[in-house]
Image (cartoon, helix red, strand yellow):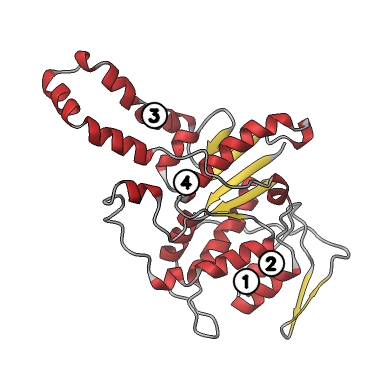
Amino acid sequence: MNKLVLIDGNAIMHRAYHALPPLTTKKGEPINAVYGFVSMLLGLINDLKPSHIAVCFDRPEETFRRKKYVKYQAQRPEMDEFLSSQITKMHDVLESFGIPVYEKAGFEADDLLGTISQKITKESKKLRNKEQINEVVIVTGDRDIFQLINEKVKVYGIGPKTAITLLSKYKSKSKIYKHLEEISETTREKLKKGKDMADMSYELATIKTDVPIKIDLKKMEDWDLGSREAVELFMSYGFRTLLNRITNKNGINANLQVVDNNIAVNNKNPKEEKMPNNQGSLF
């Protein structure tokens, strides 16, 4: 069975940053968010065992929502510079793993998750059976994403009862305004007066599923945690304890040998390596 795992990079990044104490490289550069991000990513891969994977990020540019409503997310604090300075390193790690990153100026990661999940489930039906995506799992901390759930799209960590409850709330606005006469007069008047703002809020909260991006399903399949580039990057960041968790997607250890900072990757006689049960506990 082919399973596509889509990860909200910003959600994981923020959780990792706030979960770990300050850590720095030998050069004095902050690295705690990168370490936590990678640890959680490896844990998710071990847990979900995807055949395909991709990560979506927000862009720093103003989004279409902010242009439409200037107060949108106005209360959200600016990103800590110690966190923002680590984003490039996270992208470098994902590149070394061969995991594609999707981001688009003017849109949020949620919009990309929505677009990819919906397009993949539709387009996958045209592929041969063994190439079809049978399940899409979205990893995020944002409840807005629940509006994307269908028979093939799921949200990691959320059961069907919770999903049904949330979905019923998201879909209730239009039905409420169709049945205003059935609602008490006081509430009805408040709803009428607030309809413009309700419409605006609904539009802002609706995740886009038509962002103009090029989706490459093949690239989502060609990831490999055991690449030489990944090992070298881990060494440069000082992530020695994470080296034992680098495996390819079949769970086979790359038989890494690290001697005096000289890295040799020997794929002969590979042996299985099980990830510690407590890994990924940050998520």
Q: Is residue 150 above or below residue 252?
A: above
Residue 156: tell me if it is visible.
Answer: no
Determine whether, in the image, residue 76 is placed left or right of residue 223.
left
Q: Which residue is mark 4?
A: 110
Amino acid at circle 1: Thr
Residue 148 or residue 26, whichever sits in front: 148
- What number is the disc on residue 244? 2
Q: Is residue 210 above or below residue 193?
A: below
- What number is the disc on residue 149? none
Callout 1 crowding tier (Cα within 10 Å): few <14, some 14–19, many ≥20: few
Percent position of residue 66, x then y: 34, 51
Q: Please report contact status of discs 1 and 2: CB closer than 8 Å, yes or no.
A: yes
Give the residue displayed 26% in from the left and 34% down from the top. 198
Determine whether, in the image, residue 257 is placed left or right of residue 104.
right
Q: Earlier in the sequence, mark 4 or mark 1?
A: 4
Percent position of residue 177, x then y: 27, 21
Q: Which residue is mark 3?
A: 165
Instruction: Find the residue positioned furthest to the top.
Output: 182
Q: Earlier in the sequence, mark 3 or mark 2?
A: 3
Amino acid at circle 4: Asp
Residue 195 or residue 142, whichever sits in front: 195
- Mark 4: which secondary structure? helix
Q: Tell me the CA gap for discs 1 and 3.
A: 41 Å
- What number is the disc on residue 241? 1
- Mark 2: which secondary structure? loop
Disc nearest the viewer among 3 and 2: 3
